[in-house]
Structures are given as structure tokens and as C-alpha cells.
């Protein structure tokens, strides 16, 4: 299974949930706290935490596209 992460930066409210839950895939900018997508196609070992990060995002700024 493959996963692609789509991140809508303008929607981000800098809550930091994604970076805490999936630090291999998301980080935050130091100046304003807005999330930064580090890996748009994370490996299978990160899929569960990326799903959790998307579910925890208060702004619904993370969209996942998964294919078999």
C-alpha cells in the first residue's frame, strides 16, 4: 500500500499535533509554528502515525491519498 500526504498550508493553525504524532513526516517552522511537510510519500512504517496526525489536525489541513 502506498500513501501520499497532501498538506494545505494556508489552513494550518499551528497547533503542532501533526509534528508531535508523526515527527518523521511533519515539523513546524520556528517563526510562526506552521507545519512543514517533510515527506509527502512516507513509508509503511509511518502510515499509522500519519493517519493519527491527519485525524488530530484541528484545521483538517492534512489529506491522505492511499492506494493498494
Image: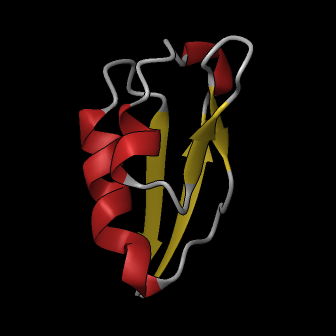
Label tally: 0
Q: Is residue 68 above or below residue 48?
A: below
Q: Position of residue 12 (x, y in %)?
A: 54, 19
Residue drawn at the location 43% of the way across and 70% of the way down: 66
**Colour scheme in the image?**
secondary structure
Q: Along the horizontal axis of the image, is 62 left or right of 5? A: left
Residue drawn at the location 70% of the way across and 27% of the way down: 29
Q: Quadrant of residue 1?
A: bottom left
Which of the image's four quarters has the C terminus?
A: bottom left
Q: Is residue 44 above or below residue 4?
A: below
* Residue at the extreme right: 31
Residue drawn at the location 27% of the way across and 68% of the way down: 48
Nearer the observer, 44 or 23: 23
Q: Along the horizontal axis of the image, is 12 left or right of 37? A: left
* Residue at the extreme front: 30
Q: Position of residue 60 (x, y in %)?
A: 38, 27
Q: Is residue 15 above or below residue 1?
A: above
Nearer the observer, 23 or 51: 23
Q: Position of residue 22 (x, y in %)?
A: 41, 55
Q: Quadrant of residue 25?
A: bottom right
Residue drawn at the location 66% of the way across and 62% of the way down: 39
Q: Position of residue 10 (x, y in %)?
A: 65, 15
Nearer the observer, 39 or 2: 39
Amino acid at each position: 500500500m502506498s500513501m501520499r500526504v497532501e498538506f494545505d498550508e494556508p489552513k494550518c493553525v499551528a497547533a503542532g499535533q501533526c509534528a508531535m504524532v508523526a515527527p518523521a513526516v511533519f515539523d513546524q517552522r520556528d517563526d510562526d509554528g506552521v507545519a512543514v511537510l517533510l515527506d509527502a510519500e512516507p513509508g509503511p512504517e509511518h502510515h499509522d502515525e500519519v493517519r493519527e496526525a491527519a485525524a488530530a489536525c484541528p484545521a483538517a489541513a492534512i489529506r491522505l491519498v492511499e492506494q493498494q
